[in-house]
Image (spheres, rainbow, N blue to C red):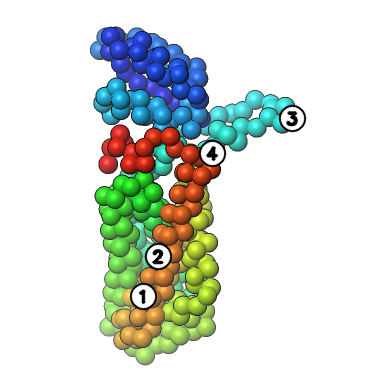
Amino acid sequence: MLRLRVAVADARKDEMVRSLDRIEGVRRLAVLPEACDGEWVVSADLSPAAADEVLKIFHDHRVPHDDYVILRQEVIAPGLGPGVSTEAESGFAWVEIVGEARAHARPVARYVMLMMVAGVVAGLGVITDNAILIVGAMAVSPDLLPLCAISVGLVGRRYFLARRAFGTLLIGMGLVMLVALLVTLALVTVGLVEKGININAPDLQGLANADYTTVLIAAAAGVAAILSFETRAANAVGVAISVTTVPASGYFGVALALGELDQALGAGLVLLINLTLLIVTGTVTLLLQRYFIPQHRSRPPADDEYLPE
């Protein structure tokens, strides 16, 4: 369930209440005086499907973005009888998805640091042929978030958002490669790793050689990525998504440091295929949900001009 609070002037209070009351999915509408500014606070419970229409009302009424807030609240459901379900309330609101995408489309310091840590762990995992370390790098990496933000930007025709998220993704992948390369060079320089170390172990072959499994795994991961992003399960699913990105990026950096150019190019190709399919299948999944599944269909115009960039 979503909870709405919006501040309105006394002269526009009744008009705002009437507009909100006409929207299906707006319930428990209440109006209270605002103590400090002499305005009124209108509050209501919203179904996710109603949130986009409510936002359009605010745009039409030219309500400033800092005069309203929409929050998601967890609901402790009462005992339900046979045939009664709360599943409809668990859908997503497009405005909520765009907000999540905007929050994760920038290369903030935490994202940069986590990608660098992933580069260290992935590089060491490749050097030592240690699957546990490679899985650890996948768990650390937050690359799922800008990946999903790209899909949101493309589906919502918010191309600046998509470009910014794509740049953030490239920065993250580049950091993994660079850190893995530097770690390998440092270990070779101090003599802890031999220059001619073999990184062609059977367990690592999939990181530098693309085949049909590369395509199928990446395509399935893109669907899982966008579904987890909608349900805020990104932390749980992120490891599965990163299997298609972080290991290949780390392998690229290690191979480049060791002079294995063919292996580095192979890892780069695997990474390119994976990223392309992740974005394509994630975008198609979100597109189908938004326009063809009734529960998730958005009512406002496709360009969402009333949502801030």
Name the disc covering residue 278, or none: none
Q: Residue at x 46, y 69 (%)?
A: 134
Q: Classify 208 as above or below 52.
A: below
Q: CA distance from mark 3 to mark 1?
A: 54 Å
Write down the residue under mark 2: 276
Q: Residues within 10 Å of mark 1 (few under 14, many from 20)?
A: many
State if disc 2 and disc 1 touch (CB < 8 Å).
Answer: no
Amino acid type at circle 3 is: Pro
Amino acid type at circle 4 is: Pro
Q: Earlier in the sequence, mark 3 or mark 1?
A: 3
Q: Classify 257 as above or below 56.
A: below
Write down the residue under mark 1: 268
The foreground one among 174 and 90 is 90
Does dot 2 land on a helix, a strand or a loop? helix
Q: Residue at x 55, y 29 (%)?
A: 75
Write down the residue under mark 4: 294
Amino acid type at circle 2 is: Thr
Tag count in the figure? 4
* Residue 131 horizontal side relative to residue 195, left or right: right
Camera-side mark, 2 or 3: 2
Camera-side mark, 1 or 2: 2
Does dot 3 land on a helix, a strand or a loop? loop
On the image, which quarter does residue 181 sit in? bottom left
Q: CA distance from mark 4 to mark 1?
A: 40 Å
Q: Residues within 10 Å of mark 4 (few under 14, many from 20)?
A: few
Q: CA distance from mark 2 to mark 3?
A: 45 Å
Q: CA distance from mark 1 to mark 2?
A: 12 Å
Camera-side mark, 4 or 3: 4
Does dot 1 land on a helix, a strand or a loop? helix
Q: CA distance from mark 4 to mark 3?
A: 24 Å
